[in-house]
Amino acid sequence: MTKDVLRPCDVKLSNDLHALTAAFDAFRELMDERDKRYAELDRSNKDAIRAAFNSAERAAEKTELALKEYKVGANEWRDTVRDVIGKTTGHNDAVAAAQVTQRWMIGLAVMTVLSLVANYLK
C-alpha cells in the first residue's frame, strides 16, 4: 500500500477534521464576539459608575455648603437672641423695679398728704 492512495476511512477522517476545524473556528468567532460585547458592557458599566460617583461627590459638596450656610445662619440667630436676652431685664429684675417704683409712689403720696395737712393746720 502506498501513501498516495487514500482509503475511504481516510477521506471520512479528513472531512470530519475539516468540519471540526470549521466548527472550532465558528466557535472561536462566537467567543470573540461575546468577549467584545462583555468588554463594551464592562466599559459602559465603569463609565456609568464613574458618572454616578461624580454626581454623588457634587451632591455631597452642595450638601456640605448648604450645611455650612445653615450653621452660619443658626449662629447669627443664636447671637441675636443672646443679645436681646442680655439687653432685656429678667422677670425678677422687673418685679424688683416695680416694687421700688411702688414704694416711691407711696412715699410721694404720703409726702403730699403730709404737706396738705401741714398747710391746712397753718
Image (cartoon, rainbow, N blue to C red):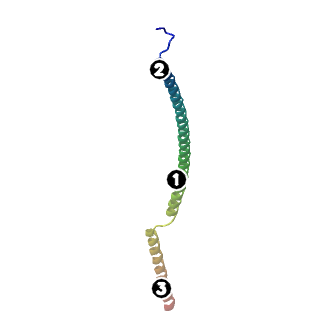
Q: Which of 86 and 113 is in front in this view?
A: 86
* Residue sitting at x 50%, y 22%: 15
As measured in the structure, the alpha-carbon distance from the residue carrying label 3 to the one carrying label 2 is 146 Å
Give yes or no for contact between labels 1 and 3 (Cβ–Cβ under 8 Å). Answer: no
Q: Total label count? A: 3
Secondary-structure class at tag 1:
helix
Front residue of 75/114: it is: 75
- In terms of secondary structure, where does tag 3 sit? helix
Q: How far apart are marks 1 and 2 (CA)?
A: 84 Å
Q: Nearer the viewer, residue 52 or 73?
A: 52
User: Amino acid type of disc 3?
Assistant: Leu
- Residue 108: image x %, image y %? 49, 80
Badge 1, how many Cα within 10 Å: few under 14, some, many 20+? few
- Residue type for callout 2: Leu
Which residue is situated farthest in the top direction here?
2
Q: Distance of mark 1 from mark 3, alpha carbons?
A: 63 Å
Is residue 5 shown above or below 52? above
Looking at the image, is mark 1 or mark 3 earlier in the sequence?
1
The residue indicated by pointer 1 is: 71
Q: Is residue 41 above or below residue 90?
A: above
Q: Which amino acid does label 1 sit on?
A: Lys
Residue at the (53%, 47%) spot, across then down: 60
Question: Which residue position holds label 3?
Answer: 114
- Which badge, 1 or 2, is on the more N-terminal residue? 2
Give residue 118's position: percent from left, percent from top.
49, 87
Helix, strand or loop at mark 2 = helix
Q: Residue 13 carries which label?
A: 2
Residue 25 at x, y = what percent? 53, 26
